Amino acid sequence: MRFIASFATLLILAACATAPPPGAELSPPVSPAAAAPSRAAQLLAAAGGANAPTRAEIEQVLGPADIARQDGAGAVLTYRFEHCALLLLFASDARNALRLAEAHASARRGGEAMPSLDQCAGEAPAR
């Protein structure tokens, strides 16, 4: 009896694992626009690099910061979105231009999952 039940179970599982008919798609196509990172995500990813964005470039894309502080040769901008907050740290380069040195994302409410920079940057256009 166990053999028959096991054999029947294997047949059912094999039927579920068959290939889709020809011409059927396995997953919906992803549009190139959806797959490409947003401009804000691209800028945040360049933090600390030789081509790091300037403070003006960040403010052009994200708008004015909710909290801005400048001390000496550095600055800090904080953006608050619906589900996350961005903390952006700027340092002066050799030509005295403030460039993005670090970018950190955090959850807005306790108990929420920590968002990635890309997820947080995705909320910027809705602001």
Image (cartoon, helix red, strand yellow):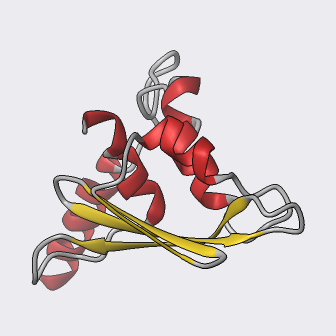
> In the rendered view of the protein, which quadrant contains the N terminus?
bottom left
Residue 122: where, in percent of width, then height? 38, 45
Q: Residue at x 62, y 50 (%)?
A: 43
In the picture as drawn, the residue positioned furthest to the top comes out as 23
46 sits left or right of 37 in the view = right
Residue 125: where, in percent of width, then height? 34, 34
86 sits left or right of 95 in the view = left
Q: Residue at x 69, y 62 (%)?
A: 99
Q: Residue at x 51, y 23 (%)?
A: 31
Q: Residue at x 10, y 82 (%)?
A: 110
Q: Is residue 38 visible?
A: no
Camera-side residue: 82 or 111?
A: 82
Camera-side residue: 23 or 103?
A: 103
Q: Give the number of callouts.
A: 0
Q: Image height check: is 108 above or below 14?
A: below
1 sits left or right of 37 in the view = left
Quarter occupied by residue 10 = bottom left
Camera-side residue: 19 or 94?
A: 94
Q: Image height check: is 106 above or below 12?
A: below
Residue 35: where, in percent of width, then height? 54, 36
Camera-side residue: 98 or 114?
A: 98
Q: Is residue 121 visible?
A: yes
Residue 36: where, in percent of width, then height? 59, 36
> In the rendered view of the protein, which quadrant contains the C terminus?
top left
Q: Image height check: is 26 above or below 56?
A: above
In the picture as drawn, the residue positioned furthest to the front comes out as 72
